Image (cartoon, helix red, strand yellow):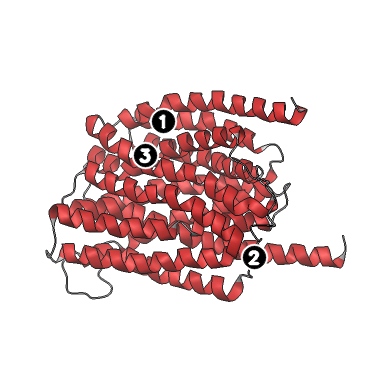
Amino acid sequence: MNSQSKEAMKSNSKILSSLMLIILFVSMGQSVYWQTMPIIGREFSFSEIEINTLVSISAAMFIIFTPFWGKLSDKIGRKSVLLIGLLGYVFSSIIFISMATFGLTGVVSGFYLLMILLISRIVNSAIGAASRPASGAYVADVTSEEERSSGMGKFGAANNIGSILGPVLVGSLIGLNIFDVQISQFGLLTPLIVMSILMTLASLVVYFYLPNSPSTNQEDRPAGFTFDTKLKLLITIGVIIFTAFAIVQSITAFYVQDRFDYDLDQTAKTTALLLGTMALMAIFAQLTIVQRYKGGPLNLIKFSLPLFVVSCLFIIFSPNFLFLYLGMSAMGLAMGLASPGYSSAASLNADKDNQGAAVGLAMVAPGIGFALGPFLSGFLYSASMNLPFFFILPFFFLIILLTRKLEQTNSTKESGI
């Protein structure tokens, strides 16, 4: 290896390390909203269905805008699109906090409050959606095909560290009026304010430290990315996985509060513990198993399926909190394998000049999952506490059939049939 190659590898390693920090903040920002919405919603007397519908509709914006931002990052560069996403989060959070303050002061209430909060979240999701495909494509830019699963594993690990720190931030600051604003329950908005400050710092890191990624002219870009049968099957698998995971995440706070009869403070802390442990187990998988794994990315998805099934069974039949905790841990371990497997498979389906488009389209799956999951969970949970877990079990067996079909498609194309 010549000195130029070593220097390029060193530079790419530094970029990757910086990206991990940015991805961590992006994930924290999303999880802070995820954790505060049920608590804020109940403070405003919204029902579970109303709260989860609000989350679902705002999450649907990722489905619409993520492919757009991914393609744009191929055209104008990752850095510009990443900055749009980070700064968009900050400005839209200011709008949301302002609207929620109107609710706390009684200026707006009921249906009208629900609508203005929904609009605020739609703006947040639509602009914030730029961060994910830009950062994911950035990772693909600085990793070789052989290193792609490892790079996406680190991407996932940073994402899950953010998922841990987000609930920790909420559990530590929720209800604390550290800004001494003389409005009742203003402390419920403290995590969102602090997160906006952190996202501003992340924007500064991107602006001053990350290099501009090369962009490709539309006329010169090779047609190396197509929405083919392989990608359709892969996105279907991703939709199932992320929908199931979103269903579990969206009802965790309700499940804990209703099953153990906790108050809001106990609910926030216990939910933070459970979701934090899930993220910790995912990190463990992504920084150990995935980093050492050298096989095809689809195998990582297949390895996750027994863990998903075991986790649901533990939660459904848990006689006490310990078994619930173990079930959540198993689900985190499963996601730690499935997520980088999915991302790597999608990235390897496109050439280097179309990574933004590939990653952006692949992230439609989590967008659909986190839009559909909370919407379904509201109705399922209203019927029975355990029904959401029974509902998702059969879909893990469907994934087995879909992965086999995808492998057959890959084999057919490789053999030239």
Picture coordinates of residue 118, whole percent (x, y): 27, 54
Location of the N terminus (image quadrant) = bottom right
Residue ID at (13%, 53%): 110
In the figure, 71 relative to 289: above or below? below
Residue ID at (78%, 67%): 7
- For label 1, the SS is helix
Q: CA distance from mark 2 to mark 1?
A: 42 Å
Is label 3 in contact with label 2 (beta carbons under 8 Å)? no
The amino acid at mark 2 is Ser
Residue ID at (28%, 32%): 380
Q: CA distance from mark 1 to mark 3?
A: 19 Å
Mark with earlier residue (3, 2): 2
Which of discs 1 and 3 lies nearer the camera? The answer is 3
- For residue 312, the mark is 1
In the figure, 401 relative to 348: above or below? above
Do we see residue 77 in this rendering?
Answer: no
Picture coordinates of residue 307, whole percent (x, y): 51, 32
Location of the C terminus (image quadrant) = top right
Q: Residues within 10 Å of mark 1 (few under 14, many from 20)?
A: many
- For residue 348, the mark is none
Do we see residue 95 in this rendering?
Answer: yes
Mark with earlier residue (2, 1): 2
Q: Which residue is mark 3?
A: 372
Picture coordinates of residue 268, whole percent (x, y): 30, 52
Where residue 382 sits, quadrant-wise, is top left
Q: Which residue is mark 2?
A: 213
Q: Residues within 10 Å of mark 3 (few under 14, many from 20)?
A: many
- Is 50 displayed left or right of 13 in the figure? left
- Is 357 displayed left or right of 2 in the figure? left
Picture coordinates of residue 30, whole percent (x, y): 41, 56
